[in-house]
Image (cartoon, rainbow, N blue to C red):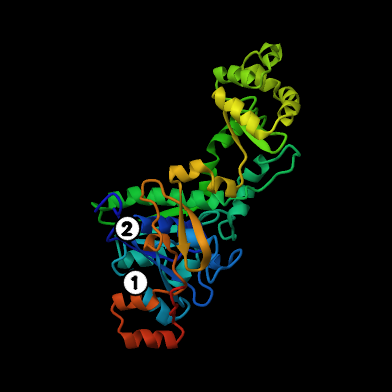
C-alpha cells in the first residue's frame, strides 16, 4: 500500500454509465483499484455517443473512464450473466447506475450480489433516489438542476433562469459517492459484511446547494446579496468579477476605483446599508467600469489587494501562465483524439503522465479477452463467447 495507490489489490465491477457513477469508479482506478467497466455490446456506455464523437470516445466518456479496463458484454443473455457472476467473484466494490428496480430484474441487485460476496460494497447511482413518486423517472443533470432549484436561482439580470452549463450535479454525485466509499472501505477492513450505498443526483444537488438553500429558507425567499459590491461588471473590452466580503475591502475598493465619493456616501456607510442600496451602487459603478479596459481595472485592484479576476474563456484559462505554473492541468495524448488533451490533475495524486494507463480511457471491449482470461476462461471459450455475441472484443485505438 502507498499514498499513490492505496486501493491497489481492490477489484471493482463498474456497470454504471454516463458521468456520475463512472467518474466515481474512475477515482477508485486512479488510486490503484482494478476497475472493470462492463458495457453493453455495440454501443457501450451511452456517454460514448454524447456530443461530438472521436473514435468511440467523447468529452464525457474520456475523463469518466481513465485508468479502467473495458469489457463489452450482453447482460440480457444467460451466458452474459454467467460471465458477470464470474467477474463478481472476489470483487470488493460493485457500482451500478440503472433506474431503481432495473438491476434487480437483471438479477444483480444488492441482495443477490451480497449473497455471493457478503463483504461487497455496493453503490447504486440514480436520479431521484430509490423511493418516492419520482424514483423511476429517468433523469440527467439538467433535470435535477431544474428540480432542486438551481436553474431558478441562476437567473441573470434579465430575470431569465439559466441552466448551469457544466455538469455540476453529475460531478458532485460522483464526488459524494466516492467520499462515501472511502470511509466504507476503511471500515470494511474489520467488518464481516459490506453495505449498500445509495447515491442520487437529488441528494448531491441538495448538498451542493446547501448554503443558498438555507439562505432562502431562513430569509423566507427574500434573499439579499451576500455582499456589495460583488459580481460581474462590463468593462470597455470585456468583463471583470469583483468580490468584496469584508469591511476593509470596501475602502480598498473605493481607493482602487479612485472614487472617494463612494466611501463618503451615507447610503454606503456600512455593510447592511451597502446591501440595502446595492442596485443604486451598481448604477453608479457600471459607467465607471465601462470607461476603462479590463487590464486597467485588474492592475488597480491588484495594487490595492481587492479580490477580482477577469472573465476568462476555457482556452484563456488553460493557456494562462499561472495555470501552467500551478500544475493544475496536464496535457496528454489520447489515441482517439487529435492533439493533446487538457486533463485537470487530481488533488492528492501525481500529475497525469502521457501514455500511462492512468491517463487513458479504454476503447469499448478493449480488454474483454484479457479480463476473461484472467477469470479462468480458455482462449477457445472466449472465442466462442465472441462468436455467439455474448462479448465484444475491441481493439486499442492507435
Quarter occupied by residue 223: top right
Task: Let me know if residue 306 appears in the view.
Answer: no
Depth order, front residue of 132/70: 70
Q: State how many labels appear.
A: 2
Mark 2 sits on what residue? 32
Judge left or right: residue 190 versus residue 372.
left
Q: Is residue 257 left or right of residue 24?
A: right
Q: Which tag, 2 or 1, sits closer to the chain's start?
A: 2
**Label 2 residue SS:** loop
- 185 in relation to 321, above or below: below
Residue at the spot 29% in from the left edge and 57% down from the top edge: 193
Separation (CA) of disc 2 from disc 1: 18 Å
Helix, strand or loop at label 1? It is helix
93 lies above or below 271: below
Q: Position of residue 15 (x, y in %)?
A: 44, 66
Q: Quadrant of residue 301?
A: top right
Q: Which residue is mark 1?
A: 87
Q: Is 295 on the left-hand or right-hand side of 122?
A: right
Q: How far from the left and from the top, in percent, is residue 243?
A: 59, 29
User: For the point 35% across and 73% down, which residue is it?
Assistant: 85
Amino acid at each position: 500500500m502507498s499514498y499513490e495507490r492505496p486501493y491497489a489489490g481492490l477489484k471493482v465491477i463498474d456497470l454504471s454509465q454516463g458521468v456520475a457513477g463512472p467518474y466515481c469508479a474512475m477515482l477508485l482506478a486512479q488510486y490503484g483499484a482494478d476497475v472493470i467497466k462492463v458495457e453493453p455490446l455495440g454501443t457501450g456506455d451511452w456517454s460514448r455517443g454524447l456530443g461530438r464523437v472521436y473514435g468511440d470516445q467523447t468529452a464525457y466518456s474520456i475523463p469518466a473512464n481513465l485508468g479502467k479496463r473495458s469489457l463489452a458484454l450482453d447482460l440480457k443473455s444467460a451466458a452474459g450473466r454467467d460471465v458477470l457472476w464470474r467477474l463478481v467473484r472476489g470483487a470488493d466494490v460493485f457500482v451500478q447506475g440503472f433506474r431503481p428496480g432495473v438491476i434487480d430484474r437483471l438479477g444483480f441487485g444488492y441482495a443477490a450480489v451480497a449473497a455471493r460476496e457478503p463483504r461487497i460494497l455496493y453503490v447504486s447511482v440514480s436520479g431521484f433516489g430509490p423511493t418516492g413518486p419520482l424514483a423511476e423517472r429517468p433523469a440527467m443533470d439538467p433535470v435535477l438542476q431544474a428540480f432542486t432549484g438551481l436553474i431558478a436561482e441562476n437567473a441573470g439580470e434579465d430575470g431569465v433562469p439559466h441552466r448551469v452549463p457544466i455538469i455540476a450535479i453529475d460531478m458532485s454525485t460522483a464526488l459524494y459517492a466516492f467520499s462515501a466509499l472511502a470511509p466504507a472501505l476503511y471500515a470494511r477492513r474489520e467488518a464481516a459484511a459490506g453495505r449498500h450505498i445509495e447515491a442520487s443526483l437529488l441528494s448531491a444537488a441538495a448538498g451542493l446547494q446547501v448554503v443558498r438553500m438555507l439562505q432562502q429558507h431562513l430569509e423566507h425567499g427574500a434573499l439579499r446579496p451576500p455582499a456589495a459590491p460583488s459580481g460581474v461588471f462590463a468593462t470597455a473590452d470585456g468583463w471583470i468579477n469583483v468580490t468584496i466580503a469584508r469591511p476593509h475591502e470596501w475602502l480598498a475598493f473605493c481607493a482602487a476605483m479612485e472614487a472617494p465619493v463612494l466611501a463618503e456616501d451615507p447610503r454606503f456607510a456600512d455593510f447592511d446599508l451597502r446591501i440595502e442600496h446595492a442596485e443604486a451602487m451598481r448604477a453608479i459603478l457600471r459607467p465607471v467600469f465601462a470607461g476603462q479596459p479590463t487590464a486597467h481595472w485588474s492592475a488597480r485592484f491588484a495594487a490595492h489587494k481587492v479580490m477580482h479576476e477577469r472573465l476568462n474563456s476555457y482556452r484563456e484559462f488553460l493557456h494562462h501562465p499561472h495555470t501552467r505554473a500551478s500544475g493544475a492541468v496536464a496535457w496528454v495524448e489520447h489515441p482517439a483524439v487529435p492533439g493533446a488533451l487538457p486533463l485537470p490533475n487530481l488533488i492528492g495524486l501525481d500529475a497525469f503522465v502521457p501514455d500511462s494507463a492512468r491517463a487513458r480511457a479504454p476503447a469499448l471491449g478493449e480488454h474483454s479477452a484479457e479480463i476473461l482470461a484472467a477469470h479462468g476462461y480458455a482462449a477457445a471459450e472466449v472465442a466462442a463467447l465472441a462468436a455467439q455475441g455474448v462479448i465484444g472484443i475491441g481493439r486499442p485505438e492507435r
